[in-house]
Image: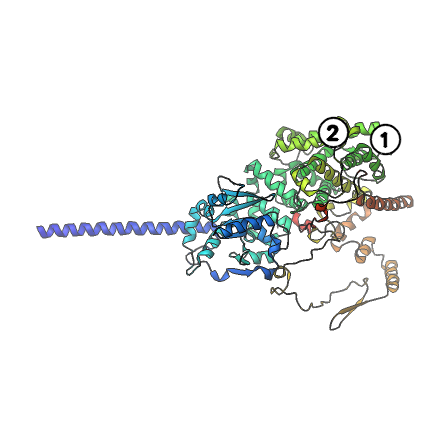
Amino acid sequence: MAVFMRAKKFFSASLKSFTRFQRCNHTSLGERSLQAELYSEMAPAANPNLQPIDTSKWKKIQASKVGISSSMISEPSWVVLNVLHKGGFEAYLVGGCVRDLLLNRVPKDFDVITTANLKQIKKKFHRAQIIGRRFPICLVHMKGSIIEVSSFETVSKHNEEKEKALSSLIPKRCGEKDLIRWRNSRHRDFTINSLFFDPFTGNIYDYNDGMSDLKLSKLRTLIPAHVSFQEDCARILRGLRIAARLSLSFSKDTERAMHNLSSSIGGLDKFRLMLEMNYMLSYGAAVPSICLLQRFNLLNILLPFQAAYINQQKSAKNSMMLMKLFFKLDKLVSCDHPADSSLWVGLLMFHLALVNNPQDARIVWTFASVLYHGNWKAGVEFARELAKLEVKFVPEISGFSETKSDEVLAEEVAQFASLVQDSVWALTETNNLLESMSRYPFCPYSGLVFIPKRIAKNTAKLFDLMVEDIESFTKGRERISPEINYHLLGRGDPCETRYVLGKIILETMKSGPCRDAAEIATDEEDCLQPKASEEFLTNNQSPTKKDKRRAPSLSNSDGKGRMPKKQKVVETNQNPLEPHTTTTTTKNRKVVVKDDPKDMAKKLQKLMNTSKISEFKINSIQGNISENEIGPLQCQEKTVVKESKGKKDKAKNSKKHTKLVAEKLKHHVPPHAAKGKTEEEKGRVGKERSGVSSLSSLFRRPL
């Protein structure tokens, strides 16, 4: 009996032990399953256990070899980095600033990440504050700048579940510092924003092929795009902003996810929407940003009136004054010289008032000139010269009056300024937006308004003096130079904002079409499909300002920091009407010999007489019209009415006058401005432009 009882106890204990083992084994399998499930949402790999992280793809690059020097880092950022480094902490530049330095661009801001926690960071600096609940960071105020400092520790705590998933992927024999940086990089939005730069060792760390995507000008999310945008739909706006500024293309899954999840933007906090829109419109890439918002069906959510206007103008093939306004804005601001949001809000107000209440061209000239000069008399006098230009914007400009008395002009300009002030409520009140949208009854809109009323009221105050007593209008401060004071403009100074607002409108009116509607209809879609030689230049730079420095590793063809030694000459099929060229290559140079232009002219005339080639085809061959434009132009050829000889003479005189006034406006200094420039303006560094190489491609939808 005793033996039987002992055997029973042994069997029971064995059974309990086996059950406990199975339970532990089941838990272990469950955890691994959970890790695999989490990772499947974080990275393209279907099975992380079968596809561990390949450390051979991790890159450590010497910054000097890709054109980055310590002098390119702002002084306030250097101070923050040094204080943390001397305190015994690791400190790196991270994200977009590293990306921009590689592209030889001025970063919008410098972000620092450190091994110190937020409390330790705050103790190191006198003026520092911790902000944010979901993802807290420390804002350090240093020499007039604000440096965002984040902690590796914060990222780890905030993403504990992902950290557990990543723990199973930790490669063997991985250094502790590499492990910390790699883990942090996996929590970022795009590959090109996951780069780290250690300015003390001069090393750039790339764990996600960010450098390769940067060379290919491709925007790609770190984890599957749908998962990334579902986690934070604001990444869609951020991605569009980066692509607009740097002229990037999208990976297929990123573009598809942006289209599918674009409607989720409407659920974002209004403060976040305003922040992202300000980054898009105030930093020198407003036009490509608007184009991308339109392409991904986001403009009708954020700015429905402007989206409806663009659609109507495109279908009618009219010139788009709105796009010209923002193009002129892009020429004046950049990442290192941004504007306050009141400037682009003021432009939207002005244009909205003009669409709903079309004005005589003379009134608009005077309105802009008074803003530019800050003085009624000087503004009216300058506007008289400009008003000789014939401008035709549809529907904004209702006509052109030859003469108006100063009293009538003052009254009508003041009335228009009042309309501009009232139009701000269509940007801040849903009811007013719905009323404005009655102009476009068939266009979709969500009723979302995100511009804060505080900003709207401050912007409306810019026009107070013009409404109250325009004839005594003066800014109250004389300009010491016609140059823009970007420090004041960035702070939203009313005087500087009015000056730049007037300058933008004057430049837009000056560039307005002065031809017949039939001729305008045959043009490209205005600013949306611009000619690179006329308005939009590569990298959005003027002909006189060229980027002197290049990042060798990103721009060369051999990928070794060197330019290629030889360029092969490829023969193309020449058009029989183009001058025949003979190319001879010597050891050091290439000589191109062309036919005599006189002989070529005779050949062209003979062919015109014998084959009756259409005028559009001839213009195309001579280089005046691109090959892609020939089709639509030939269809419209019959509808174009030929001008009489008198009209041609008038147009020729108008062009001459336009050039004279353009030169005058370009070099014009307000009468009360001094000739000298401040030391700050003399030392101002020329700003860099964002890439706007081909805006027509931004509107093209994927098949």
Work out whether 476 lies above or below 223: above
What is the x, y in percent for residue 71? Answer: 62, 55
Identify which amino acid the numbered label 2 is placed on.
Leu
Q: Where on the picture, by quarter, is residue 349?
A: top right
Residue drawn at x 74%, y 38% is 499
Query: Is residue 279 or residue 488 the one in the foreground?
Result: 488
Query: Is residue 278 or residue 697 the one in the foreground?
Result: 278
Q: Where on the picture, by quarter, is residue 143?
A: top right
In the figure, is residue 97 to the left or right of 5? right
Residue 701 in view (yes/no): no
Q: Residues within 10 Å of mark 1 (few under 14, many from 20)?
A: few
Point out which mark residue 359 bears. none
Q: CA distance from mark 1 to mark 2?
A: 21 Å
Which of pointers 1 and 2 lies earlier in the amino acid sequence?
1
Identify which amino acid the numbered label 1 is placed on.
Lys
What is the x, y in percent for residue 57? Answer: 50, 61
Query: Is residue 507 or residue 473 the one in the foreground?
Result: 473
Work out whether 624 lies above or below 360: below
What is the x, y in percent for residue 228? Answer: 51, 47
Q: Nearer the viewer, mark 1 or mark 2?
A: 2
Point out which mark residue 465 bears. 2
**Residue lying farthest to the left in this orientation:** 1
**Residue lying farthest to the bottom in this orientation:** 587
Q: Secondary structure at mark 1?
A: loop
Residue drawn at x 83%, y 37% is 382
Q: Secondary structure at mark 2?
A: helix
In the figure, is residue 535 to the left or right of 149? right
Point out which mark residue 404 bears. 1
